[in-house]
Structures are given as C-alpha cells and as structure tokens.
Image (tube, rainbow, N blue to C red):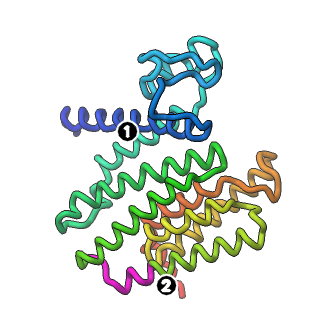
C-alpha cells in the first residue's frame, strides 16, 4: 500500500512532467512555424487569442475546456494532452519503476545513469511527436541525442564498466546500421522513410549497443512494415510515399533495451 508521501511525490512528478510536455508542445509548434519560443505567451492556434493562465494548465485545461478554444470554439489538437500525458507518465515511470532498469551501483553513475535515461526519454519523445506531426526529425534533437549517447558510452569505458572491445563493436554497429539505412534510402529514392531516419539511426545504435541494435532494427522494420501496409489498405497512406518511420525506430530501440538480450539468447537456443 502506497504511503501518502509516495503518492504526493508521484503526483508532483507526473504534473511536473506534464508541464514539461506542455512546454515541449510550444517549442515544437513554434519551431515548425518559425516563431521564437523564448518570447511571447501561448495563444490559440486557430484565432491567435492569448491564453489565460487557467487555459494553460497541463491536461486539466483541455478537459475543462472540453477540447475547444474558449474564444473561437475551434477544436484543440489532441496531441497537446497526449504529449503532456506521455511526458508525465515518463517521469512517473522513472520514479516508480525505473529503478529496476538502472543497475549501475558505481558512483557517480548511481545518479548519472537515471538522469541520462530521463534526458534520453525526453529527446525520444520530442522526435516521436515532431516526426508524427510534421514528417520531420529535427537535426538538433538527433545531434543532442548522439552527443549524449556518445559521452555516456565513453564515460562507461573510462570508468571500466564497459569493455573497450564492446565499445568498438558498438561503434562498428552504428556505422554499419547507418550505412544499411542510407543504402535503403538511396536506392529507393527516399520512398518508405526519409533521410532524417538515416541520421537518427546513429544515436539509437549507440543507445542499444552491440549486438542488441540488430534486434531493434529488426523489430522496428517489422512493425513499421506491418503498420505501413495497414495504412495503405485503410487508405491512410499512399503506396510509395514516406511514412513517419522515426517512431518505429524508437519503438524498436525501447523494445531492444528491455528485451534485447533475452531475445538474442532465445534465438541462439533455437539454432
């Protein structure tokens, strides 16, 4: 049974994560429209009316306003509350369940590892939303993820937690996986996925490591192909047209991080 303190901390973290999600919605929208996100208050995307403070409360404002602008009655994008809920859930998972995922006990990685994966989760969510809404993966998010993953891997090697040979194979796997996706993009002339997906593969390969990255690639390709075929059949997409493949790459990465080793062990036992 949860104590009141744990519930209060959990609720606070969820709301804090939702507030960050609300801010990320603003950054994503203004980045796409070319507006400056560091200045100016939030406004309705339809009538441009400046929103009051009670219209900016993450999740709750959407519910209280019944998903419509209070001034022009235009429907509000459901993506706002989805991103806020996902970010709040990420923070809540990080607090309630994430400690089972973070296994390093050597200082300072006891603190740095959870913070690293929290930042990774935020960046991955930004990429998913951006690619889904605008069919575009921002280079800034990809570069930030790449630098973060590279620093983390090098730090593990310097601390003696990761073997140099494993780091070498991870780098080799990154180069091979990027080359593989680049060849697919080049020979298909960008049909199926965009060049942003090719660049995204670099930090994702670093995150997964060797040999789990091949599990992530396999799973993302299978899921992406199945969903793509279903979208064509249902008339939601045209054959030969690119789809937002970044979310599938990220889904494959998450599945690989959680079950990659187990799936590889299972496959080895079959052969």
The relative height of residue 265 versus residue 32 in the rendered view (above or below) is below
Query: Which picture quadrant has residue 265?
Result: bottom left
How far across and how far down the image is residue 171, in percent? Answer: 46, 78
The relative height of residue 21 versus residue 159 in the rendered view (above or below) is above
- Left or right, 176 with respect to 124, comes to right
Q: Which residue position is annotated with label 1?
A: 17
- Number of marks drawn: 2
Q: Which mark is residue 242?
A: none
How far across and how far down the image is residue 50, in percent? Answer: 52, 17
Predominant secondary structure in magenta? helix
**Depth check: 184 or 220 in front?**
184
How far across and how far down the image is residue 130, in percent? Answer: 58, 46
Q: Which mark is residue 268?
A: 2
Q: Secondary structure at mark 1?
A: helix
**Residue at the image position 49 percent from the left and 65 percent from the top:** 204
Using a 10 Å C-alpha cutoff, classify the residue at mark 1 as few (fewer than 14 neighbours), some (14 to 19) or many (20 or more): many
**Residue at the image position 48 percent from the left and 84 percent from the top:** 269
Of tags 1 and 2, which is closer to the observer?
1
Which badge, 1 or 2, comes first in the chain's sequence?
1
């Amino acid at each position: 049974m949860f104590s009141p303190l744990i519930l209060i901390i959990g609720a606070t973290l969820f709301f804090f994560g939702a507030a960050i999600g609300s801010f990320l919605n603003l950054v994503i929208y203004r980045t796409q429209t070319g507006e400056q996100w560091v200045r100016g208050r939030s406004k309705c995307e339809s009538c441009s009316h400046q929103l009051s403070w009670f219209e900016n409360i993450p999740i709750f404002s959407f519910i209280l306003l019944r998903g419509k602008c209070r001034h022009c009655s235009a429907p509000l994008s459901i993506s706002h509350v989805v991103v806020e809920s996902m970010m709040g859930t990420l923070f809540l998972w990080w607090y309630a369940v994430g400690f089972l995922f973070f296994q390093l006990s050597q200082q300072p990685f006891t603190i740095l590892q959870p913070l690293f994966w929290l930042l990774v989760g935020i960046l991955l969510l930004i990429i998913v939303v951006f690619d889904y809404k605008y069919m575009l993966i921002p280079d800034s998010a990809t570069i930030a993820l790449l630098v973060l993953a590279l620093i983390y891997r090098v730090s593990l090697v310097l601390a003696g937690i990761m073997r140099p040979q494993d780091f070498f194979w991870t780098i080799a796997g990154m180069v091979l996986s990027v080359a593989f996706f680049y060849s697919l993009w080049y020979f298909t002339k960008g049909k199926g996925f965009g060049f942003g997906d090719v660049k995204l593969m670099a930090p994702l390969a670093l995150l997964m490591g060797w040999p789990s990255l091949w599990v992530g690639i396999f799973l993302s390709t299978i899921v992406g192909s199945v969903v793509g075929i279903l979208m064509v059949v249902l008339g939601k997409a045209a054959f030969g047209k690119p789809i937002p493949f970044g979310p599938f790459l990220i889904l494959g990465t998450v599945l690989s991080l959680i079950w990659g080793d187990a799936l590889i062990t299972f496959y080895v036992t079959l052969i």
